[in-house]
Image (spheres, rainbow, N blue to C red):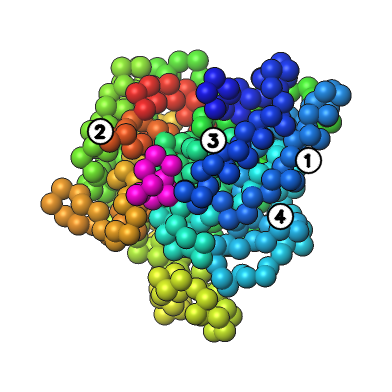
Amino acid sequence: MGAEPRTIAELGRAFRGREVTSSSVTEECLRRIDERNPDINAFITVLAENARAQAQDADRELAAGLDRGPLHGVPISLKDLFDLEGTPTTAASRVRAGHIATSDAVTVRRLRAAGAVIVGKTNLHEFALGTTNEESAYGPVKHPLDPSRSAGGSSGGSAASVLAGMAFASIGTDTGGSIRIPAAACGLVGLKPALGEIDATGVVPLSSTLDHVGPLCRSVEDAAIVFEVLKGTRPSPLDARSHEPAARAPAEPARLRVAVLGGYFTALLDSEVAASFERTCGRLRDAGVTVTDAAIPHAADISAVYLHIALAEAAAYHAATLDTRASDYTMPVRLRLEMGRSILAEDYVRALRGRDVLRQEVDCALESVDALLLPGLAVPATVLGKDTVRIGDRDEPVRNIMLRQTQLFNITGHPAITLPCGTTRGGLPISAQLVGMHTPDLLCVAATLEPSITTHA
């Protein structure tokens, strides 16, 4: 948006300084949607007239002294898994053709109460069961920086909408990395809060014990702002005493200790990702951060544990429509759901026990440090239509390699956040990931380290 505000925090200051209005900013977002959506396919449903009306209401309220907080008047988008009353919730699938939501999801009610302007609902990998956003009844989402590449998934439309300036933040879901993967691919901040912190009522599920709700945005400060609203812990909309995010950053990076997760998490990395991650570790050391090493002893079991939980739970949710409307699914998604139906109860229970082991191992790795550090994504944004990606002298399945850095923390429920840490020679974003014990503390650590991590992003 040129010299105009780029972050929610900047926009809030501009609103309250009477430099811009919600109406003017919303109109600019809608203009960008009109201009770019035909090419990148980020949105399934655009709510232009509703957004204009919400923006006008926000302007009137702010002018009258009613301040609902830092999201008041801010244009945001919603992944099309969230119920928005009177609007289709498509989940990017023909299976849900004709569905109209009769009430708002809990998170949507909280966004409305905070005065957010909802500009539309974004495209996704069908039912969130994929990492590239290619398998959608509405076509693939294309990366705003390179339309030949994926914006990541499953919240690919959400990431593309923010990167392309169509919204200042988007609300996504993360079951194996579906917030962090597209945020990393698009050079954004993606926050997966701790399991259960954000109410998922009114959100189409994928895996009931692995699903998380969180924001994709441009800064850690913005992530903290949106997190507080989604969690429902902000002051009453009528209480304008404090609109600062709850997370506060320590004054000095030298007070922090981070442990780099090696082994499994660095064994298969694109060469440019590996080099950028090493430079990031070096910048943190230069800033005074104590950088140590850590490992997850049973990391080799992550994929098996994840698949036996996620696919079994997804198949249970989809059982009725798999029986009656199987042909309405995209074929790859249907096949993955059918795989879930073949998982034995004993395998599911064994995976739950494996989850307990992995959770304990992450807890142990965090015992003496403030956060764990690892790459956010093993590869840059992948080429659309390719099932494999080259790493060194090996061809790796795209889906497996994209989940490799993220799915552990859905299994264990620990909060995790991705931050941009560099770019490839071709200008594609590279990302680092921080993991902690508690979301407010993790946001605090991320805010402190953000200048060092993103200095050369």
Given residues 147 and 270, the one toward you in this image is 147
Given residues 439 and 68, the one toward you in this image is 68
- For residue 57, side relative to residue 10 (left or right): right
Residue that badge 3 annotates: 165
Q: Position of residue 304 (x, y in %)?
A: 35, 64
- Please tell me whether mark 2 sits on a helix, a strand or a loop: loop
Tell me which label, 4 or 3, sits earlier in the chain.
4
Dominant SS type (magenta)? strand
- Please tell me whether mark 4 sits on a helix, a strand or a loop: loop
Tell me which label, 4 or 1, sits earlier in the chain.
1
Tell me which label, 2 or 4, sits earlier in the chain.
4
Q: Nearer the viewer, mark 4 or mark 3?
A: 3
- The circle drawn on residue 84 is 4
Q: Position of residue 81 (x, y in %)?
A: 60, 58
Q: Residue shown at 75%/35% (left/top)? A: 55
Q: Do the residues bearing badges 3 and 2 touch, measured as CB atoms within 8 Å?
A: no
Residue that badge 2 annotates: 425
How far apart are the two marked residues, 3 and 2, measured between alpha carbons? 23 Å
Q: Nearer the viewer, mark 4 or mark 1?
A: 1
How far apart are the two marked residues, 1 and 3, measured between alpha carbons? 20 Å
How far apart are the two marked residues, 2 and 4, measured between alpha carbons? 41 Å
Q: Is residue 172 visible?
A: yes
Please tell me whether residue 75 belongs to the stretch shown in magenta: no
Seen in the picture, residue 229 relative to 107 is either above or below; the reply is: above
Q: Do the residues bearing badges 2 and 4 touch, measured as CB atoms within 8 Å?
A: no
How far apart are the two marked residues, 2 and 1, measured between alpha carbons? 43 Å
Q: Which span is picked out in magenta?
A: 142-151
Kind of residue at disc 3:
Gly
How far apart are the two marked residues, 4 and 1, measured between alpha carbons? 16 Å
Label 1 environment density (alpha carbons within 10 Å; few <14, some 14–19, many ≥20): few
